[in-house]
Amino acid sequence: MEITKAKKEELSGLVRVYKEGFAEHNIFKQSYDKVVEYLEITQERDEETGGGYLIARAEEHLPGSTQFDSEIVGGLLISKVGEGSDGHTRWRYKHIAVAKEQRGKGIGKALIQKADEMVQQMIKEGKIKTARVEVRAAEGEKESIPFYEKSGFKLESTTEHYYRANEPMYTLMKFFS
Ligand SMILES: CC(C)(COP(=O)(O)OP(=O)(O)OC[C@H]1O[C@@H](n2cnc3c(N)ncnc32)[C@H](O)[C@@H]1OP(=O)(O)O)[C@@H](O)C(=O)NCCC(=O)NCCS
């Protein structure tokens, strides 16, 4: 398994993973073309500030041959959401999903680890000073909270009536300096 920054032409490979992982999501339930358009717009926006999509590829043995191919099996978007005057920055990891048949193998954890490394690298290079990274989970995604906790996020707050009335939203965070 390999995790890399996504190139524009690779983004369409994420559609299957996101449609599977976020079947009820306003954006990902739209047509294939609309989802690709969204991925391209967000990639362009977030790349400008040091973020963008990460993709996980798994090697697949091609049936009936000795050849191997690689397939996109997971994705994560690193998005910068703000900056203070002292070099402090705020980030959000979004759209974290792993293809159903590949879950439970450490791919989600590896995506977060790679994203963390990229943020830490920016600190090392002096591009930013400190970083708060946030992840959010809707009520329907509550089962991902232990997954985030395993990757070092701490549950910080519960916000009532967020995405939908009568449904809380959970915010978890970690800090790098
Ligand atoms: C959440 C998701 C990305 C996890 O990816 P994954 O590749 O299956 O997770 P990993 O195998 O890397 O798991 C890492 C750790 O978290 C734990 N974990 C993963 N999912 C968990 C769950 N639902 N409940 C409890 N623990 C969980 C694993 O046991 C593992 O623990 P370990 O480090 O002690 O071995 C994946 O289930 C998914 O795509 N879900 C649908 C989309 C989604 O809900 N995304 C999050 C939106 S907020």
Image: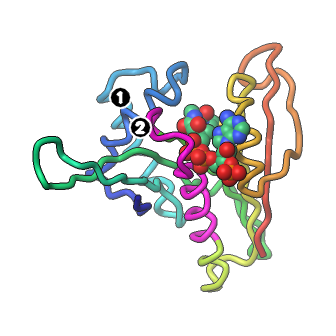
- Relative to 89, say whether 154 is above or below: above
| Majority SS type along the magenta span | helix
- Is 47 displayed left or right of 64 in the figure? right
Element assignment for label 1: helix
The label on residue 34 is 1
Residue ID at (44%, 61%): 3
The image quadrant where one finds the N terminus is bottom left
Q: Position of residue 85 (x, y in %)?
A: 77, 72
The residue singled out by tag 2 in the image is 38
Label 1 and label 2: CA atoms lie apart by 6 Å
Q: Which residues are magenta?
A: 99-119
- Residue lying at the far bottom of the rendered structure: 125
Residue at disc 2, CB closer than 8 Å to ligand 1: no
Q: Quadrant of ligand 1?
A: top right
The label on residue 104 is none
Label 1 Cα neighbours within 10 Å, binned few <14 / some 14-19 / many ≥20: some
Say if mark 1 contacts mark 2, CB within 8 Å.
Answer: yes
Q: Amino acid at mark 2?
A: Tyr
* Closest to the observer, 21 or 49: 21
Q: Quadrant of residue 64?
A: top left
Residue ID at (47%, 32%): 100
Q: Is residue 91 visible?
A: yes
* Closest to the observer, 74 or 85: 74
Label 2 Cα neighbours within 10 Å, binned few <14 / some 14-19 / many ≥20: some
Q: Amino acid at mark 1?
A: Lys
Element assignment for label 2: helix
- Residue lying at the far top of the rendered structure: 166
